[in-house]
Amino acid sequence: MSPRGIAPSTFIKHASDVASFYGFRPVRDIERQQIAAHNTGSRSLRGGGSFYSFSTAAMVCAIRAAGQPQEPVLGFYVTPSPLHAPAGVVSSEAGEFGLQVVGTPESVGEIILLKTLAAIAGEWGAPLSRVRVNALGDRDSQQRFSRELAIHIRKHLSRLTEAERTLVAENPFAIYRMQEAAVREILAEGPRPMHFLSEKSRVHFRSVLEHLEHLGLPYELDDLLGGDERGPHIAFALDFVEQDATMLAVVGGRFDEYLRREMRRKDSVGVGASIFFRKKGASRSIFTAIPSAPKPRIYFAQLGLKAKLQGLTVVDMLRTAGVPVLQSFDANRLSLQLAQAAQMGVSHLLIMGQREALDGTIIVRSTKNSSQNIIAVGEVPKFLRTLR
């Protein structure tokens, strides 16, 4: 449990540092790069505002992803004015540190995001107890479930207050945001969204759970987790061993349909999450002072899904050993990653493909003379510390 009295700026710096290590970039920098590269006369999606919201950050990442098909975009932002705080969090008392993985329909999007969230919390001093997950499915799945949920609610309207009846009449899913014991009993007796999943949604959810097991992230199915007005396909929330004095809630999900509506593009897909933290005593200026990412001498390139998942374990090892590394889990082509490494002027490359992931090895290559070594993954931190 993090000690009380820690300044919000300290948490923002910590979360930004960890997110950068896992390949996330400030949404501010992603948008600046997009404007400079394609339309110097464009204005920021923030308009006259000083901060990104979940929606504007997602749109920045989606626009960038649309311009580089099959190369997802990882971004983060900070705002003192959260728009989608979960039940139990008072928006006026919270700041929001948001993460986006936009441009990948694969379950690796959820896993990279969840792994990063767990690292932020764990290094902050709030060990993860479990990840609660629920699958609501794609639009067809949710429509089938919504009809059954509405029928169930109508049978129990007498147990709801007048205000509650008004809310569920407009949107049956609103009942999930109600925390009263009587309402939770109605939900517990009702239909479950997982029973209405399409085959595609079922396969995707199974893949997410398999990857959670592979990475050793404890999870629990929670079919009462829902109520987000953005209609996520998959919803998740992180619980900690002890209540943290700084982090109030960590929630997120896959928001494919939401992105498609906002972007008006059928190929817009992505996962987003938010850490809501106590902002008492914080000036608005600290929310714009996101520190610059470090410039390590080593770049970690991965090729293929298995390598990306195994690569998360490698990044954990390097961070624990205090070995800074640049990498991009949002790049699917090795050539693109090598070009990024060259542009950043690193001295060495770590390369993991499908074969290395299976063998438990990694290639260490010098960018100066292209000499390389193949070493066991467990020896990577020790070997890198010997490099000059």
Image (cartoon, rainbow, N blue to C red):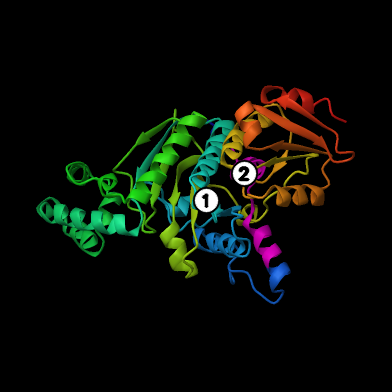
Q: Is 124 rendered above or below residue 279?
A: above
Q: Residue at x 48, y 56 (%)?
A: 82
Q: Measured from the top left, where is residue 285 in percent x and y?
A: 64, 56
Label number found at residue 96: 1
Q: Mark 1: which secondary structure? A: strand
Q: Measured from the top left, where is residue 204 in percent x and y?
A: 41, 46
Is 213 placed left or right of 343 in the picture? Answer: left
Residue that numbered label 2 is attached to: 19
Is 189 placed left or right of 270 in the picture? Answer: left
Give the residues drawn in magenta, as a range: 6-34
Is 287 placed left or right of 165 in the picture? Answer: right
Earlier sequence position, callout 1 versus callout 2: 2
The image quadrant that residue 203 belongs to is top left
Q: Measured from the top left, where is residue 151 in percent x and y?
A: 15, 56
Q: Is 191 rendered above or below residue 5?
A: below
Q: Identify which residue, 62 or 377, lies in the foreground.
A: 377
Q: Identify which residue, 381 or 153, lies in the foreground.
A: 381
The answer to if 30 sits in the magenta stretch is yes
Q: Measured from the top left, where is residue 10 in percent x and y?
A: 63, 41
Label number found at residue 153: none
